[in-house]
Amino acid sequence: LEGVCKAVSSKLREEPSIINHLAQPIVNSLKAMSSPQSVASPKQISAELCRLTVLVQHLRLPRPPSQPGIMNRSEFILGLTREAWPMLNAVSQRYPRDFNCGEKLCRLHKHSLRECGPVHYAPMLEPLVEQTVKNFGLSLSSPYLYLASIIVSEYGRNAAHSKLLYDMVASLSSAVFNTLRTTDDFTAHPDVVEEFFFMAGRMVNYCPSPLVQSPLLNSLLQCAALGMKLYHRDANRGTLNFLESTVSYSLKLRSSGPSLDANGQADMAALERAILAEGQPLVINLAQSLLGDLPAYRLDSGSGSIAGVLFYLNQLCPDLLMQWIQPPLTTAPEHAKSAFLVTLHNRVAREEFNSSVRRFTAVCERSRKRKI
């Protein structure tokens, strides 16, 4: 089908009926599968969702604005989405816990949104958010959290959508908190932990105010304190990404000085309260990661790392960080601990700080091996 789409794309101006010849059989098939009498399997539904995604991705209509009388890509995708929406809702409810089916549906929505463009796709935003929240609540499948991240990144900069996005994140968070209550729960759902914290990090990066000014921020930080203990590389990456985004945003606000507007000042005050209330357990976990007692998959990588979170905390609240980090470091080799604390005290540049973190963890690792 992909090859057919590419081959006929150049002929669509002269023969627009080709669009119907390609799309209608897929829509009809989904309509049959969504009927109460259907016995279609998850594999069959997934195959039709993939075919619809291929049309969205590879049928190359002109981008808007187009010439009069010629359908553009956004019009085609929006029309196709509207027509297929009742069927997509129905098939997603047919096998709500089938991971592959949910993943294919989320992939379709992602490409539809991006190919259509957020402005033209806006009429379908509320139904998309509703479906995402409902389906995740039924399935606890991580693709819906990934889809929520895409929605935030596409609409987060538009203040008109901020409440809808916050409500979506809050609803998804409630479902996650109800599921992930213990360390065993986190261990059983590493993909949910990963995508959940990436979504929260996207919210901080694209649409921060409604989140950071709500009690949800404290709950997310408490949840992160559990998530960062998980021995799973991707889950650890998602958690640290959220924490680094949060602390760096607070520092960015602080650095803005007198130019900060009232909303920015409210953000900064809320962030400082949350960090003061929830920061100590996070710092203790980071220290234990440096010592080798907790995972240290991302020591100084970009987009979320142990060094990154500590660096921004040291720029933001150096006295508090020093107060919180010294007790858990008492078991570290004395010379390495002293050198690292001097680095914190001097508030060195990021590259030097990363090097100091690497040296400290290397000494701690050698010390642990000698004790084994």
Image (spheres, rainbow, N blue to C red):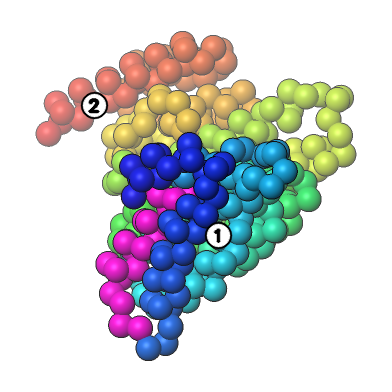
- Frontmost of labels 1 and 2 is 1
Side of 350 where 1 appears, left or right:
left
Q: Is residue 49 magenta?
A: yes
Secondary structure of the magenta portion, mostly? helix
Which residue does the image show at 36% across and 63% down from the upper left? 48
- Where residue 281 sits: x, y (%)? 49, 46
Relative to 93, is 46 above or below? Answer: above
The one of 370 and 78 positioned closer to us in this rendering: 78
Q: Which type of secondary structure does the marked residue at label 2 adopt? A: helix
The residue located at (39%, 14%) in the rendering is 355
**Pick the front one: 362 or 336:** 362
Q: Residue furthest front?
A: 14
Please give left or right for residue 229 compared with residue 145 in the image. left
The x and y percentages for residue 41 are 28, 74
Seen at 69% across and 27% down, the residue is 252
Give the image quarter of residue 268. Answer: top right
The answer to whether one can see residue 256 in this image is yes
- On the rendered structure, is 21 left or right of 271? left
The answer to which of 74 and 243 lies nearer the viewer is 74
Which residue was labeled with disc 1? 80
Name above or below for residue 341 compared with residue 295.
above
Identify which residue is drawn at 60% across, 64% down: 82
Q: Residues within 10 Å of mark 1 (few under 14, many from 20)?
A: some
Give neighbour class at mark 2: few <14, some 14-19, many 20+ (Cα, 10 Å).
some
Query: For the magenta stretch, what is the residue range?
Result: 38-56
Viewer-nearest residue: 194 or 91: 91
| Residue that lies at the very extreme toward the bottom in this rendered image | 37
How far across and down, in percent of the image, does residue 183 sit?
Answer: 35, 59
